[in-house]
């Protein structure tokens, strides 16, 4: 087993990772490639799904050419990544059009017609039925599979005429490997078309499908999460230089791969993603919803469990944004230089507060139009202060969310396993420990947690490991403890965040 590998694919919104991971979670090698999103003024946000496949093929061939790697060692393929997006495909699994990402809102008029009304933008009766069965509901803004599919049906009938399946990206890529259409309760969670109260029932809810007016026969068949979909097709085996008996497991959402890769797989074990976006997740025993704070439960790591689901649209992306702003002023800093500079600024960033709502906010208070910025700038403010303020502001926003997640889970959640690109910074990890007032564990190799998590699910699928023993086989992370002398400072900042949210929301609407 120590020699067996999984070809893991992690399709993020902004980047695609392809890696070889041992079935005990050790990442042997990986590549990271940029993925472009095309935006337009009408609300379009699309990606080329064929380009993903080209990147995967080229990267796989290079990885398999590394010294000591042979195709016989690769026993499985597992795909994880973005969701709430739609790829239209034909009977062979080939795209018939572009991927409509979760940022695409062109379906808004059709979603509003299907579920819109006067109860926080929803038809009250329909909202009640959706929430009772799924925990959430299609967004009247159109930014989910219902809106994307309705847009295609109403505006691009030529694409629909060539389409056999409307698929989530992870399920589309799984089909490219196997030729078999499949999905899970988890991968199709954001479609809001499955009654998740009974995870043993593998079908879409007829009433919900009829309510939005989507053709049920175009939705991929549901199978258990972590099950083996099939083996790679002969054409794929030849093209990617894989063994023809390599198995492929079901697609995983990045939420699930993050829980697996961080080792936070037991009841109430908690991970926090500091990636492009940010969220706080943990396994729980029952389906539950807190609609007012956009905290729900998604189908979990097994077919009888759930994962806490929420979303803050801007996480470590805020630091990338600031880097681009500074580069425009002539300061070409890499991320290590930025965090080193931030360490020169005192905790509290000399009074500057950054609110990270650069792309709106979902949890714990939803407003797609709210925008963030800096508060309390002075003529004495430095670049170091700005960088530290961004890091502290993102952490304070997470602390605001954590308070509501702990109420949702009905218990204090500690330690917090920190993952994602932002978690590579020890300074940011310490800021998180101080701001959350919780012990924080910097997960080993936090940048590739989802690659690791996908491979670990494949390991469970192949019977190499049990789900309940994954945390024990992963390397220990670095522990950060909150510094008591900073508790009052950061607690005060966290208390200010919801007040600033209300202020910024009001100004954003006026502007």
Image (cartoon, rainbow, N blue to C red):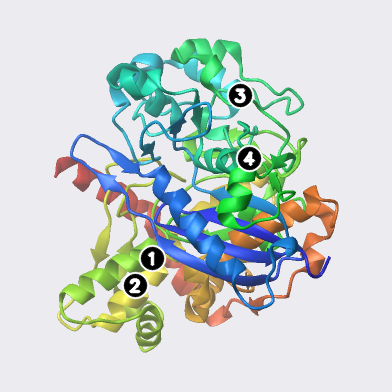
Say whether marks 1 and 2 touch (CB < 8 Å): yes
For marks 2 and 4, the one nearer the N-term is 4
Mark 3 vs mark 4, foreground winner is: 4
- In the rendered image, residue 124, in percent from the top left (x then y), is placed at 45, 16
- Compared to residue 414, the image places residue 306 above or below, namely above
Q: Judging from the image, what secondary structure is the residue with disc 4 in?
A: helix
Residue beneath disc 4: 178
Residue beneath disc 3: 194
Residue beneath disc 2: 389
- Compared to residue 158, the image places residue 35 above or below, namely below
For marks 1 and 3, the one nearer the N-term is 3
Residue beneath disc 1: 393
**What mark, if any, has residue 377 been given in the picture?**
none
Mark 3 vs mark 2, foreground winner is: 3
| Residue displayed at 47% across by 61% down | 275
Between residues 121 and 191, which one lies in front from this camera angle? 191
Q: Is residue 149 visible?
A: yes
- In this picture, residue 300 sits left or right of residue 61: right
Distance (Cα) linking label 3 and label 4: 24 Å
For marks 3 and 2, the one nearer the N-term is 3
Instruction: Determine crowd level at label 3: few under 14, some 14-19, many 20+ residues with C-alpha closer than 10 A.
Output: many
- In the rendered image, residue 105, in percent from the top left (x then y), is placed at 31, 33
Instruction: Determine crowd level at label 2: few under 14, some 14-19, many 20+ residues with C-alpha closer than 10 A.
Output: many
- In this picture, residue 411 sits left or right of residue 359: right
- In the rendered image, residue 451, in percent from the top left (x then y), is placed at 61, 60
| Residue displayed at 33% across by 51% down | 501
Mark 1 vs mark 3, foreground winner is: 3
Say which quarter of the image contains residue 321.
bottom left
For marks 1 and 4, the one nearer the N-term is 4
Distance (Cα) linking label 3 and label 2: 42 Å
């Amino acid at each position: 087993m120590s020699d067996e590998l999984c070809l893991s694919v992690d399709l993020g919104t902004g980047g695609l990772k392809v890696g070889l991971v041992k079935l005990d979670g050790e990442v042997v090698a990986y590549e990271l490639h940029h993925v472009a999103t095309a935006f337009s003024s009408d609300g379009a946000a699309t990606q080329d799904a064929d380009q993903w496949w080209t990147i995967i093929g080229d990267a796989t061939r290079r990885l398999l050419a590394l010294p000591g790697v042979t195709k016989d060692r690769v026993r499985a393929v597992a795909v994880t990544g973005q969701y709430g997006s739609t790829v239209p495909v034909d009977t062979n699994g080939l795209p018939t059009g572009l991927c409509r990402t979760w940022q695409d809102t062109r379906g808004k008029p059709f979603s509003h017609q299907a579920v819109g009304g006067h109860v926080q933008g929803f038809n009250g009766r329909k909202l009640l039925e959706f929430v009772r069965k799924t925990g959430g509901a299609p967004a009247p803004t159109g930014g989910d599979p219902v809106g994307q599919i309705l847009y295609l049906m109403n505006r691009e009938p030529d694409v629909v005429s060539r389409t056999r399946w409307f698929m989530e990206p992870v399920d589309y890529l799984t089909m490219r490997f196997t030729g078999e259409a499949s999905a899970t309760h988890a991968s199709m969670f954001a479609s809001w078309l499955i009654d998740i109260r009974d995870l043993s029932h593998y079908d879409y809810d007829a009433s919900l499908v009829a309510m939005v007016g989507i053709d049920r026969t175009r939705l991929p068949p549901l199978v258990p999460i972590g099950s083996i979909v099939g083996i790679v097709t002969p054409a794929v085996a030849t093209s990617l230089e894989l063994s023809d008996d390599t198995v492929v497991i079901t697609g995983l959402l990045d939420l699930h791969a993050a829980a697996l890769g961080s080792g936070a797989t037991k009841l109430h074990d908690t991970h926090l993603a500091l990636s492009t976006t940010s969220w706080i997740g943990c396994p729980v025993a029952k389906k539950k919803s807190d609609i007012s704070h956009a905290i729900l439960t998604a189908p979990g790591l097994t077919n009888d469990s759930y994962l806490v689901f929420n979303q803050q649209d801007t996480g470590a992306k805020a630091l990338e944004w600031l880097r681009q702003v500074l580069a425009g002023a002539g300061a070409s800093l890499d991320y290590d230089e930025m965090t080193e500079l931030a360490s020169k600024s005192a905790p509290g960033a000399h009074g500057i507060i950054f609110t990270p709502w650069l792309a709106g906010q979902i949890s714990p208070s939803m407003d797609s139009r709210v925008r963030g910025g800096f508060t309390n700038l002075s003529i004495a403010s430095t670049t170091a202060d700005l960088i530290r303020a961004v890091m502290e502001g993102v952490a304070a926003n997470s602390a605001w969310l954590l308070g509501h997640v702990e109420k949702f889970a009905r218990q204090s959640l500690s330690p917090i396993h920190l993952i994602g690109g932002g978690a590579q910074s020890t300074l940011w990890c310490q800021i998180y420990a101080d701001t959350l007032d919780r012990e924080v564990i910097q997960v080993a190799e936090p940048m590739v947690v989802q690659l690791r998590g996908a491979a670990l699910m494949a390991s469970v699928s192949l019977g190499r490991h049990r789900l309940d023993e994954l945390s024990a086989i992963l390397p220990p992370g670095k522990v950060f403890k909150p510094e008591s002398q900073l508790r009052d400072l950061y607690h005060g900042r966290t208390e200010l965040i919801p007040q600033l949210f209300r202020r910024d929301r009001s100004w954003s609407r006026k502007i």
